[in-house]
Image (cartoon, rainbow, N blue to C red):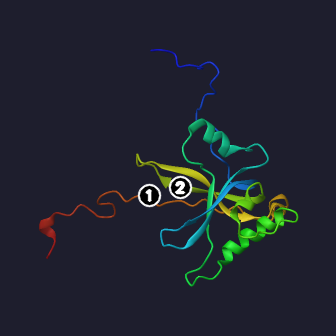
Amino acid sequence: MKEPRNYENTEAYTGDGQRLTAGGKICIVVNAYETKAKSGIPMLAVEFDIAEGEEKEYYAKAQEQFGGDWRGVYRQGTEDKEGNCSPFFKGMISAIEESNDRYKFNFDERTLIGKRFGGVFGEEEYEAKDGTIKTSTKLLQIRSVDAIRKGNFKVPQKKTIAPKAQPNEGFSSVDPADIPF
């Protein structure tokens, strides 16, 4: 086998400590754009990264190492089914405004780039392609930077998925000839 170029200088990926931890983090917006949900409801997609602490630039490092789509994306519907402003969207924008001195959102999503916000991250289980249960950490709430710094948030309980029932689980072995119908 031929040794790959730059083998000696390449950082080894072992999977240890590579997953983002749950909790509160200070984040920064790296991109923002309008999109739509499958239902057609308008959404704002905010691409973000971790701005401070041991996990700083977590998504930039993942992008550099693995490529592909940007992994730190939070999507929020902007309107409810009747076309009115979503209170969740208003809460997200309010948290970003509170976190950035003299910033007032003017509905140009590009002005969000470079703005900081507080993020509450939680763990969720998912089923991998090979059928195993794995855990990912996701941004679940956008809060103000001040709320995160003061610890004024609750880390959500890990969202788990129920294991799939095995065939015939819960049934006893019954001879079909013994069934009366």
Q: Residue at x 59, y 82 (%)?
A: 83
Q: Relative to the observer, which residue lies in front, 27 or 101?
A: 101
Q: Which residue is mark 1?
A: 163
Q: Quadrant of residue 98?
A: bottom right
**What amino acid is labelled 1 in the image?**
Pro
State the SS at label 1: loop
**Extreme bottom residue here?**
82
Q: Residue at x 77, y 49 (%)?
A: 51
Quadrant of image for the C terminus: bottom left
Chain-order first, disc 1 or disc 2: 2
Q: Residue at x 41, y 49 (%)?
A: 131
Give above or below for 36 relative to 166. below
Q: Is residue 96 left or right of residue 133?
A: right
State the SS at label 2: strand
Residue 75 % position (x, y): 61, 63
Q: Is residue 83 left or right of residue 168?
A: right
